[in-house]
Amino acid sequence: MELAGGNGKMIKKTASKGSFQIKNMQSGTYKVLVQKPGYKDKEVSVSISDGERSDLNVVLEK
């Protein structure tokens, strides 16, 4: 997974079931690129608010 926003890019590997957690993100809108071998890449946007938890659910296509 690649996350791009105001602070540049961050690359994060997910857990075996695909979950991830990033703490202390600055508020703003981020683009998230999700990649897995054998599946189509998918880019989505997520908005983060200070002090709020944001959940992001992404379904990849084969």
Image: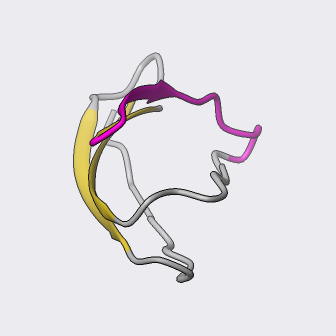
Residue placed most toward the observer, 26 or 32: 26
Q: Is residue 52 above or below residue 36?
A: below
Q: Is residue 16 above or below residue 58?
A: above
Tell me which residue sits at (36%, 36%) in the image.
7
Tell me which residue sits at (37%, 27%) in the image.
39
Is residue 44 on the magenta stretch?
A: no
Tell me which residue sits at (67%, 54%) in the image.
21
> Residue 27 appears at what percent x and percent y?
38, 66
Quarter of the view holding residue 49: bottom left
> Residue 4 appears at what percent x and percent y?
31, 35
Residue placed most toward the observer, 42 or 32: 32
Q: Is residue 32 above or below residue 35?
A: below
* Magenta stretch: dominant secondary structure: loop
* The C terminus sits in image quarter: top left
Give the magenta part as a residue range. 6-17
Quarter of the view holding residue 2: top left
| Protein image colouring | secondary structure
> Residue 24 appears at what percent x and percent y?
62, 59
